């Protein structure tokens, strides 16, 4: 059920009053945005990568299994960081960006030389089938 205009106005006034009285509590109620969450995950993945490097180097001194575990930690941290970084970089609140249209060709790539090469390629494909 939708709120009436008066109820929406009162709610906005109450939110503003709460934010003015106790900004820390108001931020707690708003929750964590997905962008902030992904930034935190990237930072933790970076820390995990450093721990993996330390394990890799320590494994050279002690036991090869420690090096393998360090490498796996580095690999998992890198994958986690790249995945989260994609969500941070697009600015769409955690929704991965999709290209809307293919990029137009630049005038330098649409030359007669390229046209000739494409035509030769097509002829080879047609003759080979």
Image (cartoon, rainbow, N blue to C red):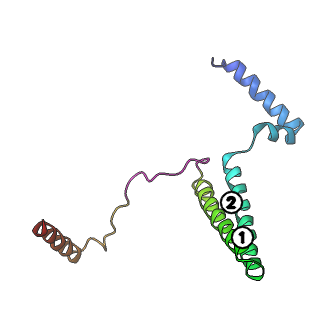
Residues in magenta, as a range: 92-102
Residue 57: % across, % down: 74, 79
Q: Residue at x 33, y 65 (%)?
A: 105
Residue 87: % across, % down: 60, 53
Residue 60: % across, % down: 73, 81
Q: Answer with the quarter of the image where residue 42 lies.
A: bottom right
From the viewer's side, name the closer residue of 6 and 98. Answer: 98
Quick one: SS at disc 1? helix
- Numbered label attached to residue 37: none
Q: Earlier in the sequence, mark 2 or mark 1?
A: 2
From the viewer's side, name the closer residue of 24 and 41. Answer: 41
Residue 98: % across, % down: 47, 51
From the viewer's side, name the closer residue of 82 and 115. Answer: 82
Q: Residue at x 81, y 40 (%)?
A: 28
Q: Considering only vertical position in the picture, is 67 above or below 4? A: below
Q: Is residue 78 left or right of residue 51?
A: left
Quick one: SS at disc 2? helix
Q: Quadrant of the C terminus?
A: bottom left
Q: Is residue 24 left or right of residue 56?
A: right
Residue ID for mark 2: 42
Q: Residue at x 75, y 65 (%)?
A: 47
Q: Residue at x 73, y 65 (%)?
A: 48
- Residue 101 lies in the magenta-colored region: yes
Q: Main secondary structure of the magenta part?
A: loop
- Residue 124 lies in the magenta-colored region: no
Q: Nearer the viewer, mark 2 or mark 1?
A: 1
Residue ID for mark 1: 52
Q: Considering only vertical position in the picture, is 79 above or below 67? A: above
């Amino acid at each position: 059920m939708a709120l009436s205009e008066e109820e929406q106005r009162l709610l906005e006034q109450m939110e503003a009053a709460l934010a003015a009285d106790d900004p820390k509590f108001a931020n707690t109620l708003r929750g964590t945005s997905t962008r902030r969450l992904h930034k935190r995950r990237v930072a933790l993945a970076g820390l995990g990568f450093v721990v993996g490097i330390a394990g890799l180097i320590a494994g050279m001194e002690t036991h090869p299994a420690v090096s393998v575990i360090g490498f796996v930690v580095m690999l998992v941290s890198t994958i986690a960081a790249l995945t989260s970084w994609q969500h941070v970089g697009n600015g769409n609140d955690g929704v991965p960006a999709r290209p809307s249209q293919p990029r137009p060709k630049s005038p330098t790539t649409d030359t007669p030389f390229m046209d000739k090469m494409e035509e030769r390629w097509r002829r080879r494909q047609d003759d080979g089938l």
